[in-house]
Image: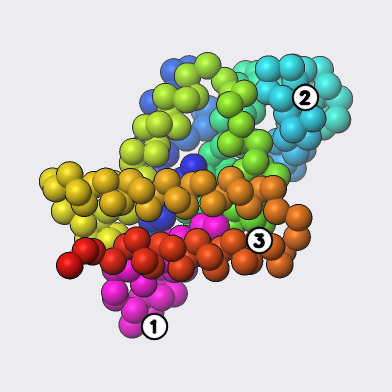
Amino acid sequence: MSGIAESAGTEAARQLPGRQGDGGLPEELAGQSPTLRRALLDAALEVFTERGYTDAGLTEIAARSGIPVGTLFQHYGGKRGLYLALWEEFREEQERLTAAMLASERSRGVDDPIALFVAGARAYLEGAWDNRRLGRFLGEDDSPAGFDALRRQWDRAWVRRNARLLEVDERRRAGRVRVSVLTTVIGGAARELGDCQDETEAREIVDEVCGILIHLSTPPG
């Protein structure tokens, strides 16, 4: 999962084995039609959600999208490319939401690190609820080869960004551990939101988690 930050770019995605070019997505997608992209990704999410990544079939994804298998291969190279595109789309949207919240809070004169951190966490969690179907799927263990390493790398980057936002000295082990715990709380809550029955329950969880974050963010002493 992405973290609370203005923007982290696509550096981690670029380093996943098999990626192409110097951007987050393969070079072939540079001129891709938004309509074609949406159709393929929506169909991929449907099939991945129903069957899991491993058992999903490209033929079925192509049939549901109404786009030939050859075109799917041309743009994404297969299931792996579709999965990574969905992950990148979710991550970038979460970053956009948190960045917008931080910018809004700062424009109102908020400069307290804990207040900004919790505001960003709230935006992230609300985004996780709004996009829960995709977030729930991406939280499953069934994923392409090499993705776990990328996710761990991204989690470490998330902790570093949160440490900067909270103005925690990363050279101190206690500070690193505190930020790691806070980041884990947010990630765990985001996964729980995927199983909520309705918006009322989701809002209760978001409020509860933000209260926990305020408590845990306060330095001891």
Q: Marks 1 and 2, how far apart in space?
A: 46 Å
124 is within the stretch colored magenta:
yes
What range of the chain is rendered magenta? 99-125
Q: Nearer the viewer, mark 3 or mark 1?
A: 3
Q: Nearer the viewer, residue 220 or 103?
A: 220
Q: Determine contact: label 1, label 2, CB under 8 Å.
A: no
Q: Which residue is mark 3?
A: 202
Q: Is residue 212 visible?
A: yes
Q: Secondary structure at mark 3?
A: helix
**Mark 1 or mark 2, earlier in chain:** 2
Q: Position of residue 38 (x, y in %)?
A: 72, 41
Q: Is residue 119 above or below residue 66?
A: below
Provide the residue designation for mark 2. 51
As for residue 86 lying within the magenta part, the answer is no
- State the separation of the CA atoms marked 3 and 2: 26 Å
- For the point 25% across and 56% down, the residue is 164
Q: Identify the residue shown where x is 52% and y is 28%.
A: 27
Q: Which mark is residue 135?
A: none
Res 44 quadrant in image: top right
Kind of residue at badge 3: Ala
Alpha carbon distance from label 3 to label 1: 27 Å
Residue shown at the point (39%, 83%) measured from the top left: 108
Which is in the foreground here, disc 3 or disc 2?
3
Instruction: Report the amino acid beneath label 1.
Output: Arg
Quadrant where the C terminus lies? bottom left
Lower position in the chain sequence, tag 3 or tag 2: 2
Please tell me whether mark 2 sits on a helix, a strand or a loop: helix
Q: Secondary structure at mark 1?
A: loop
Q: Which mark is residue 108?
A: 1
Q: Amino acid at mark 2?
A: Arg
- 200 to 194, vertically: above or below: below
Q: Judge the density around disc 1: few (<14), some (14-19), many (≥20) Cα neighbours within 10 Å.
A: few
